[in-house]
Amino acid sequence: MGFTCPMHPEVKAEKTGACPICGMALEPAQPQAETNNPELADMTRRMWWGVVLGLPVLLIAMIDMLPGHPISSLTGTRWLHLLELGLTTPVVLWCGWPFLQRGWLSVLNRRLNMFTLVALGTGSAYVASVMATLVPDWFPPSFRSADGQVAVYFEAAAVITILVLLGQVLELRSRQSAGAAIRELLQLAPAIAHRVGTEGHDEDVPLAAVHTGDHLRVRPGEKIPVDGRILEGTSWVDESMLTGEARPVRKEKGDAVTGATLNTAGGFVMEAEKVGTDTILARIVRLVSEAQRTRPPIQQLADRVSAWFVPVVIAAALATFAAWALLGPEPRLIHALLSSVAVLIIACPCALGLATPMSIMVGTGRGARSGVLVRDAATLQAMSRVDTLLMDKTGTLTQGRPEVVSLYSLGSGPGEDELLRLAACVEQGSEHPLARAVVAAARKRRLKLGPPADFMATPGGGVSARVNDRRVLLGTSSFFKDQGIDPGPLPARAGEQRKLGQTVILVAVDGRAAGLIGITDPLRRSAGETLKRLRKLGLTPIMVTGDSRVTAESVARDLDLEEVHAEVLPAGKAALVQDLQSRGHLVAMTGDGINDAPALAQANVGIAMGTGTDVAMESAGATLVRGDLEGIVRLRRLSRGVMANIRQNLLLAFLYNILAVPVAAGVLYPFTGMLLSPMLAAAAMSASSLSVIANALRLRRLDL
């Protein structure tokens, strides 16, 4: 299965254990549906045994501080100390063994971390107390109290261990809660599927036993097991787990359905097309899991500080001990020991280390629940600073459900039906939304489609293939000219249809112009309002499309877009991104087709529409499952929210350590006459990590 560190994803291990860099418990590298956490169970068990054994030690020490020392006066100081030694030893050496072990490993690995400080602090208090109990004559007068006794700090060693264990338990629970989004996604898929046998009988099989090509029956109220296409039947499907849209979508024969979505009414038989790790749900889980292991550039600051943090704290503890031993009031060495232990315990490099990973983990999970998938943390940081948004027209500003609305056949070529049939046969090999519209129109007319041979796609130009020994080309006028084909009167006819807002595909058969196909893709109803919201969020929207200038300007007028780039080839889109970047702009680019992939890769943030092609999604830093402009608004808000949360966490961590270490060293003693107890220092250290985690968990309620 493999394990990795939540703070240092570069650490890989075959079995569970501690991270050699920070000492934190390794987690499964792959998302897990179950919530069993052996590390949490072990730490919880050690904590409760620590409470059972350590609480009497604390009570004994507190009661004996009363006037007359009521307990030691009855038992004698030596016997009291031996009792405390017997109770404290299992707390420190068994309950606290993981901390001592990780502290020692940090020294061996030359990677000093939080557990180095905990081991030094508890170890110092425990060892000094053991020596004071067993060999008190070894101690000089400066270690003795006014009554000549050598003080012991068993209660400090025990309580520090218990509080650090409590902090670890709460931290592990919080980290488990932060990963809830992944577990929720994993639990969406049904456990079984109803496979239709050769004789028509249904057979219940585990989801893992479903193969591509299987026919599956989906009943009302059941979840769809895998991705596929409806073969028979009609239904309404709730796709809210993907899109966030609660309204069910009508599905009928030929429509695609997605695994883990809910079939609300009506039954149907479907063919499995993508199973196992190839389903959309599996890809979402994989994207979110991988994103949670990444770190944004802002983390580099915390990394640089953390590299020097522990050595500086150890030096501060030594300096504290020396200052109290030389300059402090009597008993000087007791004050020196307590203050230096408090410095070691209170410092918290863990809060610095958790500041960014926790925000990324919770934030990416929050985005996934709203249909916003982020490939890595750097994308979130970049998206929070982007000022320019380049948008493709098809599938972004439009609904992404284009329809064939006109056919024109030259008299010398095939008729309209044959023209559409030949075009649809070729377009079966393409993933572009316009290609799907052509195929859908042919099926609606019940035209018989054959498989294309020698299919070739020229991004931004067109496609070609051989159909029944006839060479068929579809594309633009410039694509025809590049192929040596005279478009004849088709460009003029195409111009007329473009004025009506249609996208036009020219068709040639066997090297001669044959006709054209007019397609319209309605604008998204909320496109205009969403563009206004994007402007308020600091983005300048620009439309860039490979479509004709006439069609593009018609759309721009309807949406009040000031800047439009039309008839742009894929290389031109990437060049436009580069030009804007050279002028100091940070650019986000949306797209859903193969022709958008170069620009998506070039942009500071590439945003793929989930309704688009695999190539576009692989080239992008973020994917919008629902594939609409609202997703861009959610992505912008998510990125700003996560980055603000990271800055808050880093500020909390820095301020805590900057203020806490001097207080533990005794800087307030001249004004208050009081020193910070190592026990309070342990509580403060645990609280600092928990405050960072609690702040990150607020992202689960982030309004997108």
Image (spheres, rainbow, N blue to C red):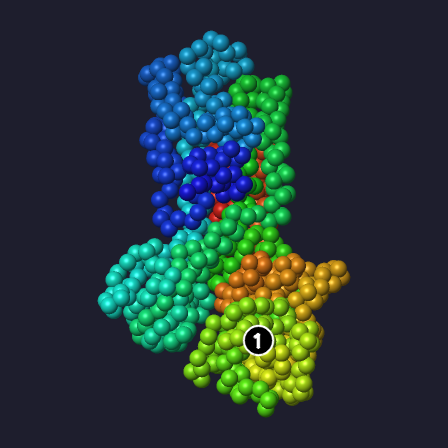
Residue at x 43%, y 17% (from the top left corner) = 130
Residue 342 visible, this angle: no
Residue at x 61%, y 70% (from the top left corner) = 392
Residue 17: percent from left, percent from top: 44, 34
Sort mark 1 into few (<14), some (14-19) or many (20+) by Cα contacts within 10 Å: some
Q: Nearer the viewer, residue 475 or 44?
A: 475
Residue 335: percent from left, percent from top: 54, 22
Residue at x 37%, y 39% (from the top left corner) = 38
- Corner quadrant of residue 207: bottom left
- Corner quadrant of residue 406: bottom right
Residue 363: percent from left, percent from top: 51, 54
- Corner quadrant of residue 505: bottom right
Q: Nearer the viewer, residue 181 or 519?
A: 519
Residue 370 visible, this angle: yes
Horizontal arrangement in the rendering, residue 291 relative to residue 274 (left or right): right
Residue at x 52%, y 15% (from the top left corner) = 143
Residue 44: percent from left, percent from top: 36, 37
Q: Is residue 96 above or below residue 492?
A: above
Amino acid at circle 1: Arg
Horizontal arrangement in the rendering, residue 365 relative to residue 73 (left or right): right
Horizontal arrangement in the rendering, residue 227 relative to residue 422 (left or right): left
Q: Is residue 406 above or below residue 275?
A: below
Pointer 1: what residue? Answer: 471
Q: Nearer the viewer, residue 431 or 360?
A: 431
SS assignment at label 1: strand
